[in-house]
Image: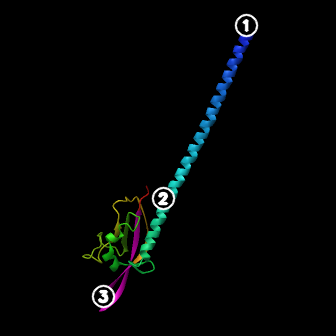
Amino acid sequence: MKNFQILNCLNKRKAQFKIQQMAFMILAVILLFVIALLFYLSIQQKNLINQSLNLRENQAVIMSRFISDSSEFSCGSYCVDTDRMIFLQNRSVYNKFWPVSYIRIRKIYPEYNNEECGIANYPNCSFFNIYENSNIESNVFVGSFVALCRYEKIQDSPERICEIGKITVGYNTN
């Protein structure tokens, strides 16, 4: 009888040990799946962030093309009328129209002093601030080249004078 009790006690301990082993194995398998799920979710989050950045960049590129072809500024394909721009820059009409942080047009050639264009110093200026949204902080910008054209009176007839410029659109990457 004593042998039977000892044998029974040893069997119970073996069974408890096997149950503990099985519990630890189940816990290890669950932990492995959780780690794999976290790894997969982190990769998906990075892909989602990259897609978001690409969409914002594409939006800014499209915005720069839209401005050069919009009726307010355009004087042809990829041509911006600077005479119109002087009167339309920093108008409150555009405050909620464009979802970017800023839109600037800089004269590339010929170079002028580094002054913002206004009625007083036009056409001997360097850049136009078309739009600036102080609520959106800009980290990155993209742009495209355009012709900046204006009319001047030369020998009693209007002449179209064009310069090289670049539209830059700032957008937020956060």
Give the SS element for disc 3.
strand
x and y percentages locating residue 35 in the rendered image = 58, 40
Check if residue 167 falls in the magenta segment: yes
Q: What residue type is labelled 2?
A: Leu
Q: Which residue is drawn at 56% across and 43% down?
A: 38
Give the SS element for disc 1.
helix
Label 2, on which residue? Answer: 53
Q: Nearer the viewer, residue 131 or 1?
A: 1
Q: How many C-alpha atoms fall within 10 Å of the one at disc 2: few (<14), some, or many (≥20)?
A: some
Label 1, on which residue? Answer: 2
Q: Residue 54 vs residue 127: left or right?
A: right
Give the SS element for disc 2.
helix
Closer to viewer: mark 1 or mark 2: 1
Distance Cα–Cα, label 1 vs label 3: 122 Å
Closer to viewer: mark 1 or mark 3: 1
**Position above or below: 45 against 58:** above
Closer to viewer: mark 2 or mark 3: 2
Magenta stretch secondary structure, dominant: strand
**Which quadrant holds the N terminus?**
top right
User: For residue 95, what is the image quadrant?
Assistant: bottom left
x and y percentages locating residue 45 in the rendered image = 52, 51
Task: Please report the bounds of the magenta region as a residue range.
Answer: 148-170
x and y percentages locating residue 144 in the rendered image = 44, 71
Which tag, 2 or 3, sits closer to the chain's start?
2
Distance Cα–Cα, label 2 vs label 3: 46 Å
Q: Which amino acid does label 1 sit on?
A: Lys
Label 3, on which residue? Answer: 153
**Position above or below: 171 against 108:** above
Q: How many C-alpha atoms fall within 10 Å of the one at disc 1: few (<14), some, or many (≥20)?
A: few
Q: Residue 120 vs residue 36: left or right?
A: left
